[in-house]
């Protein structure tokens, strides 16, 4: 994964760079950028897109108010997401839009649907109307959230186990 407009240090202010790189490798994300141009009309914490020449591009918004985002994500997901976890959850959510996870509801398939307006979209066999495309986007977001919640919980449990294993009293008990 290429870092487009950020240094590793700038990325580390938001999220563990190794986490992002491993997710990129696992889910086919070719590029990462820090993008604060999203503005109030598009207040995304993260966004994934499919480039015209191929490849998946992940953007993280460094201007995100993490406290407000944590509150909004906690309400939306039913999970208690802390401000320092916002970008981790957002990355899981965006990976939920990749072909490896979402299949016919991936970002690439969603972008292709408009080219089949008033025609049958071959992968789904559905007639693509504007309403159907809207419903598919809503469904894709629900699926990405379901997947992200599951993966986020696993990630959180793994971090907790690691932290417990690193505690001095645990290490001394393990060495006996």
Image: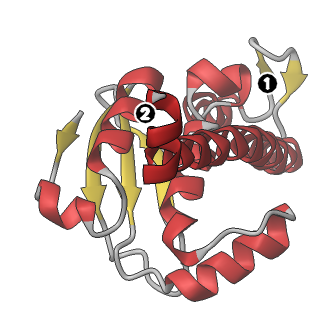
Pointer 2: residues within 10 angstroms few (<14), some, or many (20+)?
some
N-terminal-most mark, 1 or 2: 2
Q: Position of residue 102 (x, y in %)?
A: 69, 27
Q: CA distance from mark 1 to mark 2?
A: 35 Å
Secondary structure found at label 1: loop
Secondary structure found at label 2: helix
Q: Position of residue 11 (x, y in %)?
A: 24, 60
Image quarter of the N terminus:
top left
What numbered label is drawn on residue 154?
none
What numbered label is drawn on residue 23?
2
Q: Is residue 38 left or right of residue 152?
A: left
In front of the other: label 1 or label 2? 2
Q: Residue at x 72, y 79 (%)?
A: 72
Pointer 1: residues within 10 angstroms few (<14), some, or many (20+)?
some
Say if 105 sits above or below 142 in the image: above
Q: Is residue 15 left or right of residue 113?
A: left
Residue under label 1? 119
Asked if residue 73 can be seen in this view, the reply is: yes
Q: Position of residue 33 (x, y in %)?
A: 26, 55
Asked if residue 6 can be seen in this view, the reply is: no
Say if 130 sits above or below 154 in the image: below
Indicate the quadrant where residue 112 lies.
top right
Q: Residue at x 69, y 28 (%)?
A: 116
Q: Is residue 141 left or right of residue 70?
A: right
Q: Nearer the viewer, residue 6 or 117?
A: 6
Q: Residue at x 82, y 62 (%)?
A: 77
Q: Nearer the viewer, residue 144 or 176?
A: 176
């Amino acid at each position: 994964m290429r870092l487009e407009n950020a240094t590793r240090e700038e990325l580390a202010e938001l999220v563990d760079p190794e986490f992002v790189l491993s997710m990129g490798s696992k889910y086919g994300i070719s590029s990462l950028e820090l993008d604060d141009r999203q503005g109030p009309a598009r207040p995304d914490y993260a966004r994934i897109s499919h480039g015209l020449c191929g490849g998946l591009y992940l953007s993280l918004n460094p201007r995100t108010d993490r406290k407000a985002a944590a509150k909004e994500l906690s309400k939306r997901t039913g999970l208690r997401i802390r401000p320092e976890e916002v970008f981790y959850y957002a990355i899981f959510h965006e990976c939920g839009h990749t072909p490896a996870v979402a299949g016919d509801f991936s970002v690439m398939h969603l972008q292709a649907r408009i080219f089949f307006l008033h025609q049958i979209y071959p992968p789904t066999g559905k007639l693509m109307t504007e309403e159907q495309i809207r419903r598919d986007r809503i469904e894709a977001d629900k699926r990405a959230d379901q997947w992200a919640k599951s993966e986020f919980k696993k990630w959180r449990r793994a971090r907790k186990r690691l932290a417990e294993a690193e505690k001095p009293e645990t290490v001394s008990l393990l060495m006996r």
